[in-house]
Image (cartoon, helix red, strand yellow):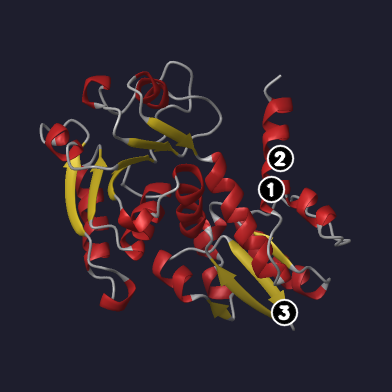
Amino acid sequence: MHMAALGACGLRHVYGRLHIKPEELKEAFGRLSETGFIGVNLTIPHKTAILPLLNHIDPHAKIMGAVNTVHFKEGELSGFNTDGRGLARAIADDFGVQLGTLRVMVIGAGGGAGRAVALQCALEGCPELILVNRTRHKAEALAREIEALPAQSSAASRVTVLESDDAGLQRCLEKTDIILQCSSLGMNEGDPSPISSALLHRQLLVYDTIYSRETQLVLDAKAKGAKTSNGLSMLLHQGALAFEIWFNQPAPVAVMRAALLDYRKTSSH
């Protein structure tokens, strides 16, 4: 999608992939900065390891505690996190509604993607935030983190914590507008849904961050007449935000979307 965006904007740059081991991170970023790189995207485990190496960290990335986009400028490294804001854009694009107006249930709120998604929901001002995780103490730790956010950063979402098999799940789903599924359930063929199909209904919005396949949750939700989408749009919009950071111009989102869809189509054969 980035190569398509560069071409559409007439930019003669290349987006490539580098395999950098954790112990190589400091030396690698020194060399990247010296050799004319404009920026990079980072994935696990570098999202947190990069923090001490940065000259500037965007306030949003500080709250997230992780960086996925770095901009090189005048010998200095600035870090950003586009994951959460990419999700917010994706929800608006896919469902035509602002994330901050929705009562949200986050499945898999123990860390990783679930943590970033839950924090973004709080920052967007979602009135109700229900954190569901197999191990309750991890979700409780995240709830405390959300409740400790500065008042100016959050609309003080009301936070509820549940385990995956909690009897209160049905009651909470009755006051949920959107399910954000962030667990790994669905990555593999035959994985069950994290929520019984009997609890789903047509008024729900269902967003599954897994985009490599139609998960059982998405299939069940569709069967109930609910609107669904998946993490491909989050991937698209976090990438578009990174492009805008690097080049200080609007990203050609339609071109990037077409490239992503084309890649997914060809890679599935």
Residue 150: x %, y % from top left: 28, 76
Between 259 and 59, the one nearer to me in the picture:
259
Residue 202: x %, y % from top left: 30, 28
**Mark 1–mark 2 distance (CA, rounded to whole Å):** 6 Å
Position of residue 264 in the picture relative to residue 225 (left or right): right
Disc 1 residue type?
Ala
Tell me which label, 3 or 2, sits earlier in the chain: 3
Disc 3 residue type?
Lys
Residue 52: x %, y % from top left: 53, 74
Per the image, the residue denoted by label 1 is: 254
**Residue 197 falls in image quadrant:** top left
**Residue 136 falls in image quadrant:** top left
Between 173 and 267, the one nearer to me in the picture:
173
Residue 19: x %, y % from top left: 71, 50
Task: State the residue at coordinates (52%, 55%).
Answer: 86
Q: Which of marks 1 and 3 is in front?
A: 1
Per the image, the residue denoted by label 3 is: 73
Per the image, the residue denoted by label 2 is: 258
Tell me which label, 1 or 3, sits earlier in the chain: 3
Position of residue 134 in the picture relative to residue 192 (left or right): left
In the picture as drawn, the residue positioned furthest to the top comes out as 190
Task: State the residue at coordinates (39%, 41%).
Answer: 182
**Mark 1–mark 3 distance (CA, rounded to whole Å):** 28 Å
Q: Mark number for residue 128?
A: none
Q: Residues within 10 Å of mark 3 (few under 14, many from 20)?
A: some
